[in-house]
Amino acid sequence: LNPPCVSERGLWSDHRSLLSTMATIKSRRRDKFKHSAAGRSKCGGQARKGGGGGKGTWGKAGDEYKYEDDDAYLGWQDPNYDEQDSGGFYFSSVPEKEIETAFAASIQMQKKFKEAIREAGRVYFVSSEKGEFAERVKETKMRDSLLYHEIVKELVRMSLDMGEKAMHSCSDLLRYLRKKEILDARHMYKGFYHLFNQVNDICMDVPKAKEKLLYAVECALLYGLTKENIDHLRQSLRKGTDQKTLKCAKGKIAVILKEYLDSEDVEELSTCFKEMKMPYLGFELIKQGVSLSMDRGPRERELISRMIVEVSGKVVPREETSKGFEVLLQRVEDLLMDVPKVLEYLSSFVARAVADEAVAPSLLLQAHIQEGDGGYEVILQAQKLLKKSRAIQRLTRVWGPSSGDNIVTLKKHVRDLLLEYFSSGELKEAIRLAKCLPPHFHHEIVKRAFVISLDKTSREVEMSAKLLDALFEGKVTLKTQIQRGLKRIEASIDDMKLDNGKAPDIFKNFKKKIKCV
């Protein structure tokens, strides 16, 4: 049988019908999942988190301007992080030799000048010869009368220990020096200001010091001081308290600070100081805290820096915080006797407080300190620290790694320490940086020193052994920490052997070179 005859027109009609049906099915399937503003995206077709989230994203629009000039946002694990440009984690606050020399010279000059004034003062209070005193002042040959405010301070302080007659003699001498233009109003005000900042301590030795100082203030108009200056001096005296209460308050502050350094609870410290109801003694809290920590280690200095940030403007008025630093700057000469590194430590405290916004930057300009004072070089060093690259971020680590740092960060500190040591060969600097690390983490120095020197030469192996011996001899690192570090190396030596086949032999040589084990 012949098949039914199908016309060409009918075949094309059926074919078009089939294609149309398939296109409709495909169109419906595509329409179900088509990409549109109301499609599969949960964010209405927009990038998630505004383009700032998710792996591999470029960040939000405008972020390129935020990070344009601030490399501090780069972490040390970032591929673009440059160790040399970023300055590393460490922030060396050690003053340069030129600054240390200038500081030592200013302290020596101030000491000699004070001794000369005291000697001339003792002679004057016996003989009452004003002209002779003036000649002795000229013989000191003090350049540009830099320290002439010390004349006012020393004479008034000496007269406080004597009778009423000495106070009148002191007043007559100051008027004479003012008339002869040896002293000016600036010297007068600054001398009284420095003295009044120490009024609480003076009252401990001279019970009636306030009454005598009030008499001196009444005579201040004759010295050329303005009414505004005199009112400011009077106000500082009114804030004081009686000798017995003051002595008790100082003792309480000392106990509060001791408990804080043990507990690290700044909220408890704030509560205890608030309960004293003496905000006008806030400067005493700052002064005692900084003085106490300068005799201790990096941990205590870091805790006091944190305390200053927490209490300033809340428990302690900001002007009291600034006054605490001013008193310390005015007593640099006395602090140097107990703290040889007072230039480094006090400048770091001041710079850190400014960076943390605990005190205003104007403290560095408006403090009653001028060239010739011991505190002047401290201020210059603080200004230098604040001008360093990324100082605001890096000053948070001016005291070294804190105990709150995590393991990864502490390991980074150890690595920085060793790389710098291998590069420069400065053993003293490496020891100083090691002191900043928590003592219980010094075993990492042992292990990391060997791991780094493994990929280098025998020079680094010898330097590592020398460093460990120096740390032990200087009582920076315990013997148990060195032994623990060696045990860690021994436990990982098989893995190290895969990278360096000579690792076991190098380790044996490394152990032999360490004399303290």
Image (cartoon, rainbow, N blue to C red):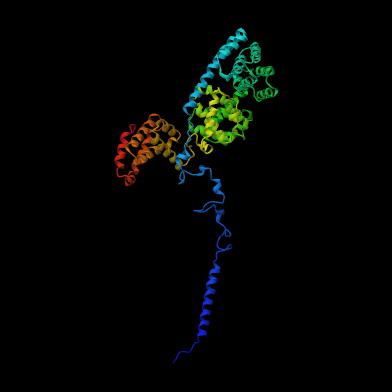
Is 281 in front, or is 167? Answer: 167
**Apparent side of residue 100 relative to residue 279 in the rendered image (left or right):** left
Quadrant position of the C terminus in the picture: top left
The quadrant where residue 243 appears? top right
The percent position of residue 104, horizontal first and vertical second, equals 49, 22
Say above or below: 468 vs 148: below
Direction bottom: furthest residue: 1
Direction right: furthest residue: 227
The percent position of residue 449, horizontal first and vertical second, equals 37, 38
Quadrant position of the N terminus in the picture: bottom left
The quadrant where residue 221 appears? top right
Is 375 in front, or is 183? Answer: 183
One can see residue 354 in this view: yes
Number of marks in the image?
Answer: 0
Q: Residue at x 41, y 33 (%)?
A: 430
**Apparent side of residue 293 relative to residue 427 in the rendered image (left or right):** right
The quadrant where residue 242 appears? top right
Say above or below: 5 vs 36: below
The percent position of residue 178, horizontal first and vertical second, equals 65, 15
The percent position of residue 308, horizontal first and vertical second, equals 57, 33
One can see residue 340 in this view: no
Is 273 in front, or is 317? Answer: 317
